Image (cartoon, helix red, strand yellow):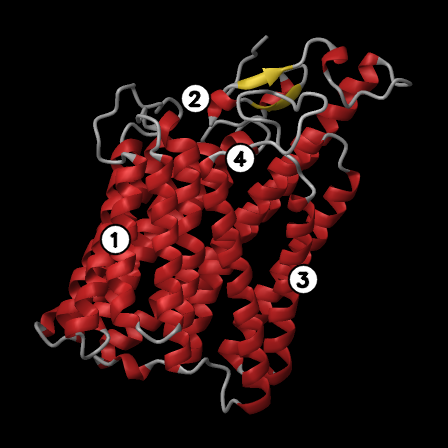
Amino acid sequence: MRGASPPGVAVEILTNPAEDPRRAPDLSHLEVFNLTRAREVALSRLVMAYVSTGLVFMLLPGTFLGVWNLIKISGRESLASISPAWLQAHGHAQVFGWVGSFILGIGFYSVPKLRGTARGAFAAAWACWVMWTAGVSLRWFANIYAWHWRALLPLSAALEMAAFAIFFYVVSRHRPAPSGTGRRPQGSCQASLDPWVWVVASASTGLALSLVGNLAACLGLALHGADPAFAHGFDQRYLALVAWGFLVPFVWGFSAKWMPTFLGLAPTRPRLLLAAVAANAAGVLVTLAGWGGAATWIFAAGAALAIIALRIFEPSPKEPKTRGVHSTFPFFIRAAYGWLLVAALLQVAAARWDFSGGLWGASRHALTVGFIAVMVLSVGQRILPAFAAMRLLWSTRLMFVALALVSTGCALRVSSEILAYQDYAAWAWSVLPASALLELAGLTAFAVNIFGTFLFERSHFATQPLVVGISREST
């Protein structure tokens, strides 16, 4: 049967303990119920810890430092007025501290639920959280204060690498059931994987390579560097690996999993999606080989293929599921993919006409804020309340405010950065701080809404007998 649950999320309720294959034969039915309920509560606490940590990195080491950097840049009308180490501290906190923490937390939340008894997975997940949080924190501290940075930079990178190794070990032990079934039939071979899984796997490979590259670069700096900042040429290639090899495929993969249901889209075109991922990987390799100009065209082609494969801008044959979130949810998802196209085209233009970093910076901001951040704010407020012990989103109006502020700030930042850095319009320098403050306000509203959900919304475990897992209808 199905019990009451947050709008738009289907939840499987177990009414017969014999349906649970994890039930030990020497336990009573009531003991099985209590153990499973306790495990679900423990999982929700785990994911809330990861998400809360990500929100703190997003606001303080990430966005606040980014706003401060931009205010100083606009005041002096020069990108060279800011230490590259500070810029890299801001970026690392946003990518790995915010988005990385979200991905690890949701990944750990999902895998133990499917594995049944997972006592070791809980300990591993908390150990991973400690290492990951310490690693990102030490990296930010070393970049900002330069205190014993020759020791702290390699240590931070090693902690992040160790945390990912724990995550990979737990995830790699999971064997999914065949598509369309609740469990693997006896005697079945390796289950065939849906296309979105392969896309997420490619993104995980990109994350692993990003962490390996980070560790190697930090060791190189510790031995031969003059300050705790990557060299400009290496940093530009590394950012391409992080953005297009890690972040973008993750969003594509989870879009393929969730958007057909959330937006009511027609089924994804799997071959085109895999072709987009292949083009994306080729673009990363070409960039690492030093042919950045050619890579921009490959990234643009991959982005176009992904949009066609996901059918983002095609009419929806079904009604989108917006119950429990703001009605503008489908609009912002499509707007985010519009920003993806803008980012790709600005890269092409930057390779040809950029002489001051303005076009490159605008492209990177369109990608990281317009595409990645807007997708995280949209989908995060759609799924995180359900992961947090089946809560409702605290405020749908605050969801709209957050997305509107971030989108407006991003539009101002991308346009004014081109005008100001390229010396097209001096007045655009004064717009840059305003754009940063709008984005800070929007991300703060997002954090307040998620923390409000965790603190003030009641868990549905209080009224439901037993939650086994989120069904395929929710995804």
Of the residues under marks 2 and 1, which one precedes in the sequence?
A: 2
Of helix, strand and loop, which one carries label 1?
A: helix
Q: Position of residue 362 (x, y in %)?
A: 24, 64
- Residues packed near mark 2 inside 10 Å, few (<14), some (14 to 19) or many (20 plus): many
Of the residues under marks 2 and 3, which one precedes in the sequence?
A: 2
Q: Compute the Cα span from label 4 to label 3.
A: 27 Å
Of helix, strand and loop, which one carries label 4?
A: loop
Of the residues under marks 2 and 4, which one precedes in the sequence?
A: 2
In the rendered image, the residue lying farthest to the right is 26
Q: Is residue 186 left or right of residue 27?
A: left
Residue linked to disc 2? 8
Identify whether 409 is placed above or below 193.
below
Residue at 14% across, 73% down: 353
Q: Nearer the viewer, residue 119 or 245?
A: 245
Q: Compute the Cα span from label 1 to label 3.
A: 35 Å
Residue linked to disc 1? 301
Disc 2 + disc 1, Cβ < 8 Å: no
**Disc number lying in front (1 or 3):** 1
Q: Position of residue 326 (x, y in %)?
A: 32, 30
Residue linked to disc 4? 193
- Residues packed near mark 1 inside 10 Å, few (<14), some (14 to 19) or many (20 plus): some
Q: Nearer the viewer, residue 345 or 393?
A: 345
Residue at 60% across, 70% down: 157
The amino acid pointed to by label 3 is: Ala
The amino acid pointed to by label 4 is: Leu
Q: Position of residue 152 (x, y in %)?
A: 62, 77
Residue linked to disc 3? 162
